[in-house]
Amino acid sequence: MASITLGGNPVHTSGELPAVGSQLADFKLVKNDLSVASLSTFAGKKLVLNIFPSVDTGTCATSVRTFNASASGLENTTVLCISRDLPFAQKRFCGAEGLENVVNLSDFQTGAFGKANGLEIVDGPLAGLHSRAIIVVDANGKIVHTEQVAEIANEPNYEAALAAL
């Protein structure tokens, strides 16, 4: 269980992020068109998983915008923006912002992705949502970088995530 904060107040997650060097577990997440994506959907690609509580908060929105700006220049890399938001909210946000370089994925149905990767917030006002975290995966599905953001309101270290590619 990771101990993080929200506005300086302690909250906890369901576990720890997967270890660097391990394989990312397969997942089933819902795309904006309501189809299902899995790890095999992105086979052979390097992945940046930008995970956050909700696209309708300032820091989460900033992370999506920031990774969208970086993603267009990344070779053989896909940025996945993952939250428990409904796919309609994710699509609305990116459409309104003109963001086309990231792939939104929703864990709204079961939260299984968050639980499997130790990301589910288990107490406090955001219980049930995902913590803010980054997981970077190489083209073979091996995790090469992780960051569990200690204060949910803070942005992740974008430079460290991109340098891991």
Image: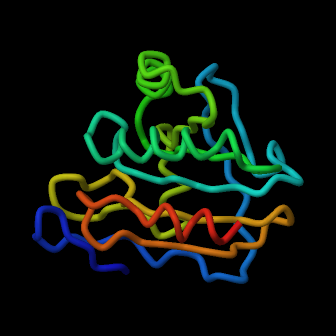
Q: Is residue 76 left or right of residue 50?
A: right
Q: Position of residue 145 (x, y in %)?
A: 61, 74
Quadrant of the snapshot with the C terminus: bottom right
Residue 73 found in image quarter: top right
In this rendering, the answer to whether 35 lies above or below 1 is above
Q: Position of residue 155 (x, y in %)?
A: 34, 58
Quadrant of the snapshot with the N terminus: bottom left
Residue 146 found in image quarter: bottom right
In this rendering, the answer to whether 44 lies above or below 164 is above
Across the whole image, how many numbered discs are drawn on residues?
Answer: 0
Q: Is residue 164 left or right of residue 55?
A: right
As rendered, which of 62 and 13 lies closer to the eye? 62
As rendered, which of 132 and 36 lies closer to the eye? 132
Q: Report the residue at 77% width, 72% height from top.
A: 142
Q: Position of residue 34 (x, y in %)?
A: 62, 23
As rendered, which of 87 and 162 lies closer to the eye? 162
In this rendering, the answer to whether 20 lies above or below 118 is below
- For the rendered model, the colour scheme is rainbow
Q: Report the residue at 65% width, 82% height from top.
A: 20
Q: Report the residue at 72% width, 49% height from top.
A: 74
Q: Report the residue at 10% width, 70% height from top.
A: 9
Q: Position of residue 13 (x, y in %)?
A: 35, 70
In this rendering, the answer to whether 156 lies above or below 40 is below
